[in-house]
Amino acid sequence: MKHTILIATASLLLPVSAVAAPTPAAVMQHYADIAHATYSDALSTAKTLQSAVDQLIATPSEATLATARTAWVVARSPYQQTEAFRFGNAIVDDWEGKVNAWPLDEGLIDYVDPGYGSESDQNPYYAANVIANPTLTLSGRRIDASRIDKALLGSTLHEVDEIESNVATGYHAIEFLLWGQDLNGTGPGAGARPASDYDRAHCTGGNCDRRAAYLKAATDLLVDELGWMVAQWAPGGEARAAVTGGAPDAALATIFTGMGSLSYGELAGE
């Protein structure tokens, strides 16, 4: 017993340098593991949101709308934790606008308050209202929007003409479809979209079938995109390979670039 105590005491007196320092390779492996786990959480909660949206569309009521809103809030939390991976990782930064673009010109998507206005010098599609219009003219081309699906939103409408406020996909487009336009300015509160905006039998706001199709397509596309990003951080994925297979110093710089850009440039700066 005495010898055991002496050995334990001696081990406590070892210099810090005697403890093996983590290698850059181990650090980057752990970084990639955390990214994979965090995006997996975002995907899991987005699938719960997807189920809630399906229920809202099938049986629109204030209860199913409230459930979908709660699911959106829950889904948003793990995604926000991924934002430290955005800056410094080109594969994430090039992709994140598909799921996280904001602010958006809501009139591109659906009806808005008259105070919103009908035109903008910066955006010719400011009030395009794709939900109300089965035919659109975009970039001088006549577009058949009679079917609202993932391809229309992701490949045709999103950031059309490279205008960033033309946000047709992602969390914030879904947020607008669940809550409606926020008319509270800088004060507390949120939009007050009624569940009847999705009720085909007692429709408010018009075009309830197309609004439901838009919400469904946007939510399904969010799940698809998050699934793609999870795969990028899985073993063999491109994002994982980029941080674990490069020069150690450059890889470590990726971590600090991401945290610094988010905390100083994005949160503090904006």
Image: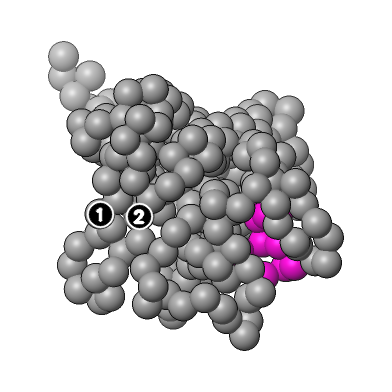
Q: Residue at x 83, y 60 (%)?
A: 141
Q: Which mark is residue 192?
A: 1
Residue farthest to the right? 141
- The amino acid on which the numbered mark 2 sits, given as a three-letter code, is Gly
Q: Would you name the residue on which mark 2 appears?
A: 180
Q: Is residue 241 visible?
A: no
In space, the residues marked 2 and 1 are separated at their CA atoms by 6 Å
- Where does the magenta region start and end? 156-166
Q: Is residue 32 visible?
A: yes
- Return the residue nearer the eye: 74 or 238: 74
Q: Which mark is residue 239?
A: none
- Return the residue nearer the eye: 84 or 124: 124
161 shown above or below 78: below
Q: Residue at x 66, y 74 (%)?
A: 124
Which one is earlier in the sequence, the residue at label 2 or at label 1?
Answer: 2
Give the percent coordinates (x, y) of residue 131.
54, 49
Q: Residue at x 30, y 50 (%)?
A: 193
Give the percent coordinates (x, y) of residue 33.
54, 34
Pointers 2 and 1 in contact (C-beta within 8 Å): yes
Disc 1 element: loop
